[in-house]
Image (tube, helix red, strand yellow):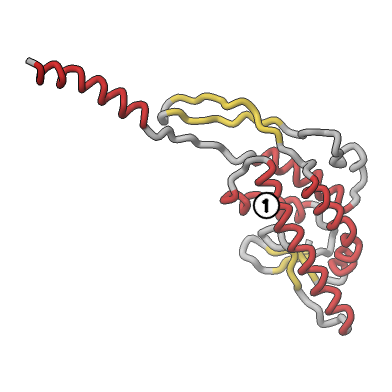
Amino acid sequence: MKKQMIRFLGLPLLAFFVISCAVITVNVYFPTEAVEEAAEIIIDEIQGEDGTQDNTVNSDQQSYFRKSIPFNLFGNSTVYAGEIDLNLTTPVIRKLIDSMKARNAKIMEFKEKGAIGETNDGMLAIREMGGLGGEGIRTVKRLVRAENNDREALYKELATANKIALSDVGKIKAVFAKTLKQKARPGHWHHDENGNWTQK
């Protein structure tokens, strides 16, 4: 009798324990639209595009975009965990943007010459330096190295500051690459989807 009672009571307790300890699968969707808007704002500020006065990232502003992020609970019901704020105002982000702004004129100069171009992962790459002298070649190498260091740090800081998984930094890079290509001037070079150089 005692064993039967333990068995009778044990089954519900075991079921409760299993449910309590069940791993809840949470699918947080990458905030593509928010990152696209962030890329546009940041690139416009760096490149000094017309109309960026209203879009410039201000330290007084705490966030720019609010996107609902769906969570799948137990795989069948959807709840919303509120909204995320895509923060572009951390001191690290501001410092990186300022650093990139400071060298943008030189980068544009060498883009006009076809020496450098944009890749599919949001980075700069050397394309052709045949027409440059020794000092020009050294300048291009220095510019590309410094710019890519800043870009890499920017993408990671955007993820960290906005609680985006570091495993999604590649997606951030892809969004910036797409935006950089869209905003490229006629004659500038970039990689096509196969990684080959093509001219806008």
* Picture residue at 21% right of the left edge, 22% below the top: 11
Is residue 39 rendered to the left or right of residue 50?
A: left
Side of 178 where 2 appears, left or right: left
Please, is residue 125 above or below residue 100 in the view?
below
* Quarter occupied by residue 146: bottom right
User: Residue 15, relative to residue 140: is it above or below?
Assistant: above
Residue 31 placement: quadrant? top right
The percent coordinates of residue 187 (x first, y second) are 83, 64
Query: Quick one: label 1, few (<14), some, or many (20+) residues within 10 Å?
Result: many
Provide residue 79's location: percent of width, then percent of height: 52, 24
Image-quadrant location for residue 103: bottom right
Q: Which residue is mark 1?
A: 156
Nearer to us in this view, 195 or 121 = 121
Q: Residue furthest front?
A: 2
Name the spot of residue 49 as percent of width and height, x first. 90, 49
Q: Write the residue at 84% across / 60% down.
A: 186
Picture quarter with the N terminus: top left
Q: Position of residue 151 (x, y in %)?
A: 74, 57
- Helix, strand or loop under label 1: helix
Specify the quadrant that holds the C terminus: bottom right
Q: At label 1, which amino acid type do we have?
A: Lys
Q: Residue at x 34, y 26 (%)?
A: 19
**Going 89% across and 81% down the picture, which residue do you hit?**
135
- Residue closest to the eye, 191 or 105: 105
Placement of 2 over or under 178, stated as above or below: above
